[in-house]
Image (tube, rainbow, N blue to C red):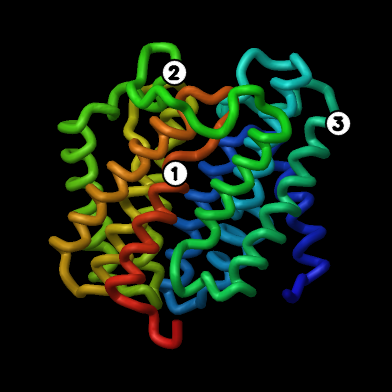
């Protein structure tokens, strides 16, 4: 397995910064940088911003978001914050360098894990960044949490639910279909070489800025990314929308087993992306994969 030591060092900074500004704010920046990177790609400027900033050691979800989530779990274990699932909270205000260092350490873990999946040949088979977000959070749960990985109670309640306003089946189908349609349209219109495969994801991630301020917006990036991938793979917008719905249900189902009854954040959308992208690439294999 090849490790780029400069990138590994940068990942430490990315994880630390993600913890400092907060887990969800770090991911919102991911979305914003995807929008910038997609714009650059659409203008013919290449994909360097997407590869090295949005999905790299600066704001890659496996690094900045993963580092923030782990640092939040650690801060909760130390009794510094009331909940290990409070991903909107910037941790810089705790005035605890050890919390930020945990974020940096898990930024490096995220980079190393993703490199391992790529070395193992999983890159053409699923979204390894999303898979890394999930595995990293599970490691943090085992290290800092007390609830265990999985719950025996599948039904959400007011104290444990993930996103209350989108947990019902009708809501899930509706928002999954709508987001799937627009993300698939963008993907087919622009194409992957001009950022169309991730633009819907970027819009969905950036929209969470409203959730940061407590508004009841939907969480939809696990619908947008599979929809775009399926649309490009199949050339069909309707199939894209179907996978938007599939991603929505995959995220909610994962939440009910691994997230909502736990005491740390294990990201349901990342799991929804990893699962649905794996299915898409099983149906439409990547050439050379």
Classify mark 1: helix, strand or loop. helix
Q: CA distance from mark 2 to mark 3?
A: 30 Å
CB atoms of marks 2 and 3 within 8 Å: no
Observer-nearest of 24 and 190: 24
Say whether residue 20 is left or right of residue 218: right
Residue drawn at (71%, 27%) of the image: 91
Q: Tell me where residue 166 appears, x and y as whole percent.
A: 28, 29
Relative vertical location of residue 91 with respect to residue 224 in this rendering, above or below? above
Residue tagged by mark 2? 160
Instruction: Give me the disc on residue 173.
Output: none
Which of the two discs, 2 and 3, labels the residue nearer the N terminus?
3
The residue positioned farthest toward the right in the image shown: 97
Residue drawn at (23%, 44%) of the image: 176
Residue tagged by mark 1? 206
Q: Residues within 10 Å of mark 2 (few under 14, many from 20)?
A: some
Observer-nearest of 121 and 75: 121
Say whether residue 244 is left or right of residue 263: left
Residue tagged by mark 3? 97
Classify mark 3: helix, strand or loop. helix
């Amino acid at each position: 397995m090849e490790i780029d030591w400069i990138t590994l060092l940068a990942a430490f900074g990315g994880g630390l910064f993600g913890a400092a500004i907060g887990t969800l704010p770090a991911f919102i920046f991911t979305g914003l940088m995807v929008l910038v990177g997609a714009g650059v790609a659409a203008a013919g400027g290449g994909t360097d911003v997407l590869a090295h900033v949005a999905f790299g050691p600066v704001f890659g979800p496996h690094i900045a978001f993963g580092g923030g989530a782990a640092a939040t779990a650690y801060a909760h274990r130390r009794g510094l914050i009331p909940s290990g699932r409070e991903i909107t909270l910037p941790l810089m205000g705790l005035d605890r360098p050890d919390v930020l260092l945990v974020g940096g350490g898990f930024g490096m873990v995220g980079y190393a894990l993703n490199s391992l999946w790529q070395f193992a040949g999983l890159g053409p088979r699923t979204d390894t960044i999303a898979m890394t977000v999930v595995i990293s959070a599970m490691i943090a749960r085992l290290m800092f949490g007390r609830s265990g990985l999985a719950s025996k109670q599948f039904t959400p309640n007011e104290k444990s639910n993930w996103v209350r306003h989108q947990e019902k089946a009708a809501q899930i189908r509706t928002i999954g279909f709508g987001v799937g349609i627009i993300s698939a349209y963008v993907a087919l219109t622009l194409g992957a070489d001009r950022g169309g495969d991730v633009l819907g994801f970027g819009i969905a991630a950036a929209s969470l800025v409203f959730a940061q301020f407590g508004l009841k917006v939907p969480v939809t990036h696990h619908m947008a990314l599979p929809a775009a991938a399926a649309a490009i793979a199949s050339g069909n917008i309707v199939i894209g929308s179907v996978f938007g719905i599939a991603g929505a249900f995959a995220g909610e189902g994962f939440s009910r087993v691994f997230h909502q009854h736990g005491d740390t954040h294990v990201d349901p959308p990342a799991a929804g992306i990893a699962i649905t992208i794996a299915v898409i690439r099983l149906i439409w294999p990547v050439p050379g994969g």
